[in-house]
Image: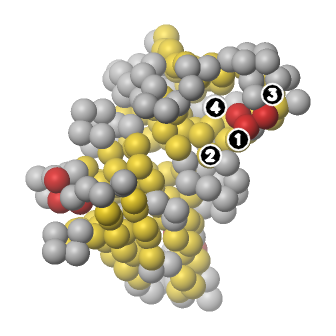
Amino acid sequence: EVQLVETGGGLIQPGGSLRLSCAASGFTVSSNYMTWVRQAPGKGLEWVSIIYSSGSTYYADSVKGRFTISRDISKNTLYLQMNSLRAEDTAVYYCARRAPSNWGLGYWGQGTLVTVSS
Amino acid sequence: QSALTQPPSASGSPGQSVTISCTGTSSDVGGYNYVSWYQQHPGKAPKLMIYEVNKRPSGVPDRFSGSKSGNTASLTVSGLQAEDEAAYYCSSYAGSNNLIFGGGTKLTVL
């Protein structure tokens, strides 16, 4: 069974850094296309980043240069390193697996809340 | 890119059909057949309901269907049931390895 479990969220001051983790089971992270999607409180979904099985990475303009997506093959875990955090980064962050042949995100974690506030 | 445009709310009575629209541009919805729809209940993660405009993942009831015309995609829920009450989000590939979402539509079953 495919499972994704995010951890690492919490309260962080503006300008701070945080690393989110997404532990996967039931499949191999490095062989799949993995994404991060966030949802600000009471708002809609926003795509954040993707890492392909090749290792290529892409980011939304809103986080480019501040966030880094990566993975650890030995731990079968996806990461999102978030630097220079801003109040507008406050959101629930979901990791999700993208289908290889289309852009449907078929498997999602439960999300982890990141609050950026002083 | 700007978010796709969805109506903030929609409603229907049990057994009725309701259609939710998702309007983009020729650079996203109109340019690719990579429109997806997600259902999200309060406090829960989104669930994929439709991908590639009109395909249903295994386990999604055939009451849910998708279509596209030009720059506008649509999700139709037929035979509304109480458990269909949720927020629905569309998404579309927007080129250059970017994905954009709609603002979401709150579906109320009256």
The residue under label 1 is B86
Dot 4 surroundings within 10 Å: few (below 14), some, or many (20 or more)? Answer: many
| Residue under the point 66% across and 22% down | B77
The residue under label 3 is B11
The answer to which of marks 1 and 4 sits earlier in the sequence is: 4
Select label 4 or label 3 by which is in front: 3
| Residue under the point 46% across and 84% down | A15
Counting from the top left corner in percent of width and height, residue B63 is at: 61, 20
The residue under label 2 is B40
Q: Quadrant of the C terminus of chain A?
A: bottom right
Between the C-alphas of marks 3 and 1, the distance is: 11 Å
Which is nearer the eye, A38 or B3?
A38
| Residue under the point 45% across and 19% down | B54
The residue under label 4 is B6
Q: Secondary structure at mark 3?
A: strand
Dot 2 surroundings within 10 Å: few (below 14), some, or many (20 or more)? Answer: some
User: Relative to B54, is A53 above or below?
Assistant: below
Between the C-alphas of marks 4 and 3, the distance is: 14 Å
> Which residue of the protein is positioned furthest toward the top in this rendering?
B69
Which is nearer the eye, A14 or A109?
A109
Q: Amino acid at mark 1?
A: Ala
Q: Amino acid at mark 3?
A: Ser
| Residue B47 appears anywhere in the view | yes
Between the C-alphas of marks 1 and 4, the distance is: 14 Å
The answer to which of marks 2 and 4 sits earlier in the sequence is: 4
Chain label for disc 3: B
The answer to which of marks 3 and 1 sits earlier in the sequence is: 3
